[in-house]
Image (cartoon, grey):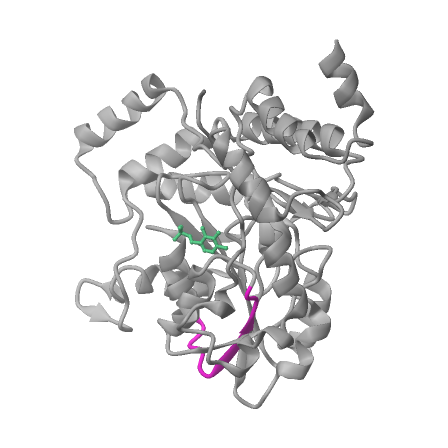
Amino acid sequence: MKNIYVTSPLLPPLEEFVPYLEQIWQNKYLTNAGPFHAQLEQALAEYLGVKHLSLFSNGTMALLTAFQTLRLKGEVITTPYSFVATSHSLLWNGLTPVFADIDPHTFNMDPASIEALITENTSAIMPVHCYGIPCDVDKIQRIADTYGLKVIYDAAHAFGVKQNGSSILNCGDLSILSFHATKVFNTIEGGAIICPDARTKQRIDYLKNFGFADETTVIAPGINAKMNEVQAAFGLLQLQHIDGALAARRTIYERYCTHLNNITGITFYSETAHFEWNHAYYPVLLDDAYPLSRDALYEALKEENIYSRRYFYPLISSFSMYRHLPSARPEHLPVANQLAERILCLPIYPDLGEEEQMRIIDVIRRYAAKTDSPTADARHVA
Ligand SMILES: *Cc1c(COP(=O)(O)O)cnc(C)c1O
């Protein structure tokens, strides 16, 4: 039986990539703001509907550089319900993470929990658009404006997500994308910072290239975080396939919703009309009414060669380098702790076939209470 992983990279046909490589071999431009790099920055800014975008070697380097760009100090309020790179980027910058609890419906930082955490040392808020679901950007901006804080969105999951017809990446001071192989859009490894003005982009571009402003001028202790030409070319090709990939994700999302509807003890995230989602993940929450625990279902799927993931368990706040922080105490983060114990992300990626997806759904239904899913019974009888 074929293994099914939680995700599988979007890979355009190999023969379509060859001409790009031939061009790189011809002009011998391998990295350092080459022609494909310039083309991809422009193409992505247009596709996403953002003003300025700077490419990076990966999303974590983009996060690290974002804090250098804004010269932040002190404490940054963030979410424990994310991938570790979110908080690690603070520690690498000598900043202190302060964890806020999350909203049980959106999985995102709860704006109501932010204000009580603000001190005279707070310099910024770093929310995550978890699973590509938009944060409450208006409320977060109002708090930031009231207290004079910067807002940096870890938008690693939010490629192509729009709200009121505009990219969610236009919110806050900076947004960071990841183009890792596991993400909706990938450049194998890669990432970007989105910023609102040319001056900020200039500073970001210096910082990702050791701080060089020209041959003899170094304006800051920058780093090497440049995207190379092979990555950029891969991104340009990938961009030609992204609309098909997003449409395929939607189909898979809808199939799950149809077949997991009415299973007692399972809730999934239902799309609402107020934004355009990218269906980056398929998170389901299990409660006590489902006969198996979250971990038991995770293991049951594994026995069928289906590798779901418990994103985000364990919480960042529970790792050894964070758990001493006062804001990391579990009683301080009740919702995040509860969701971390109940969440399971099911496989979703463009070439997940219908038969494979039904294998996943069948396992979940097999253990469901006998009164559930009359359609499933009918299908099995037939
Ligand atoms: C993937 C991811 C990152 C890290 O991006 P890389 O490109 O892998 O360095 C950061 N934050 C979140 C929320 C992510 O999912």
Quarter holding the C terminus is top right
Q: Whole-percent x and y of residue 71? A: 42, 77
Residue drawn at point x = 44 percent, y = 27 percent: 3
Q: Nearer the viewer, residue 129 or 258?
A: 258
Q: Nearer the viewer, residue 86 or 329?
A: 329
Whether 380 is drawn above or below 243: the answer is above
Q: Residue furthest bottom?
A: 120
Report if residue 116 is visible in the image: yes
Query: In the drawing, does residue 24 fall left or right of residue 262?
Result: left
Report if residue 54 is visible in the image: no
Query: In the drawing, does residue 380 fall left or right of residue 201?
Result: right
Q: Whole-percent x and y of residue 27? A: 19, 32
Residue 72 part of the magenta segment: yes
Quarter holding the N terminus is top left
Whether 3 is drawn above or below 185: the answer is above
Query: In the drawing, does residue 173 fall left or right of residue 234?
Result: right
Q: Residue furthest top?
A: 382
Q: Whole-percent x and y of residue 108? A: 64, 60
- Which portion, as a residue range, is magenta? 70-80
What secondary structure is the stretch in magenta mostly built from? Answer: loop
Q: Whole-percent x and y of residue 374? A: 82, 24
Residue drawn at point x = 49 percent, y = 80 percent: 325
Residue 379 part of the magenta segment: no
Residue drawn at point x = 66 percent, y = 58 percent: 135
Looking at the image, how many numbered discs can be counted on the residues? 0
Residue drawn at point x = 44 percent, y = 40 percent: 182
Q: Nearer the viewer, residue 364 or 312?
A: 364
Query: In the drawing, does residue 133 fall left or right of residue 349?
Result: right
